[in-house]
Amino acid sequence: MTKPPATVTQQNPWQQLRQFTRARIALGRAGHSQTTDTVLAFGLAHAQARDAVHLPLDCAAVASALDRAGFATLPVHSAAPDREHYLRRPDLGRRLDEPSRARLARARPDAAPDVVIVIADGLSALAAQSHGVPLLCAVRERLPEGWAMAPVVVAEQSRVALGDEVGELLDARQVVMLIGERPGLSSPDSLGIYLTYAPRVGRTDAERNCISNVQPEGLSYAQAADRLVFLLRGAAALGCSGVALKDDSAHALPDASEGEHNAIGND
């Protein structure tokens, strides 16, 4: 009898650990190379990440979902006229175009709202469209009684700092950006949250607080909303955000740190 040919594919002994992480570990090998399935999986993940960067935000669908959830909305656009300019000129994504600036100036309320929330495409419109509205609903349930929310702003071709100008024009005490993070090879739809107290043009990243990796495989909507409202309360009490506002929610909210990764910047 002839012996069956030996397979050239060698399984990695850590294979069973892959069920606990989306990281690319225990890939195995075929000779000195990766196996065909891992090469194809990497190519798919890379394509999904690239698609997430270029996918446009369906503002009409987001506005419709917000309307069904009982939120008033204000659409705005950055000074970047299209995706090509947005990717090549980050500075344009940090400022509003003139029609949007005028629209927000007209919408400025008589009494300063406690918070304005912006749903922005950022570097992953897929994340903003998938997670923005359900996260916002979870946040609304947890806001302190009596807090006034401005209409939700839906922003296209937006960077994080666009929220500073939005908050300043609406005279909001705090601005929260729900924005798509730069896609990774295992997370094309990760949403980031950026909080800035007393927003105005010229604020720096050191004056913001960030909660990242909001997605089904990361931080849940409930966990993210708990942490955000914790920080909103803290910023209101302290009168500032950023490095001066320590995030102690891990002690106050035992499950808050589950699934969180470090922030993946949008600027």
Image: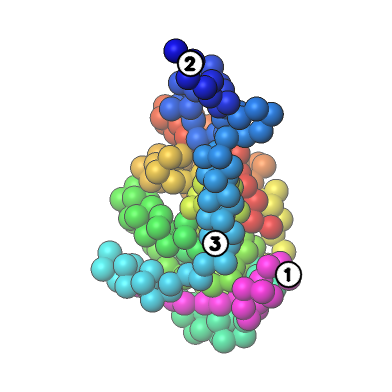
Q: Using the rendered image of the protein, determine whether residue 208 is visible from the camera's viewpoint.
A: no
Instruction: Give me the C-alpha separation between circle 2 and circle 1.
Output: 62 Å
| 218 in relation to 184, above or below | above
Which amino acid, mark 1?
Arg
Q: Residue at x 42, y 62 (%)?
A: 129
Closer to the chain start, of discs 3 and 2, is 2
Q: Nearer the viewer, mark 2 or mark 1?
A: 2
Tell me which segment is drawn in magenta. 71-91
Q: Which residue is mark 2?
A: 2
Which amino acid, mark 2?
Thr
Q: Nearer the viewer, mark 3 or mark 2?
A: 2
**Could you tell me residue 169's position as x and y percent?**
57, 74
| 257 in relation to 182, above or below | above
Q: Nearer the viewer, mark 1 or mark 3?
A: 3
Q: Residue at x 45, y 26 (%)?
A: 20
Side of 33 where 73 appears, left or right? left
Q: Depth check: 150 or 15 in front? A: 15
Quarter holding the N terminus is: top left
Q: Which residue is mark 3?
A: 51
Q: Depth check: 7 or 148 in front? A: 7
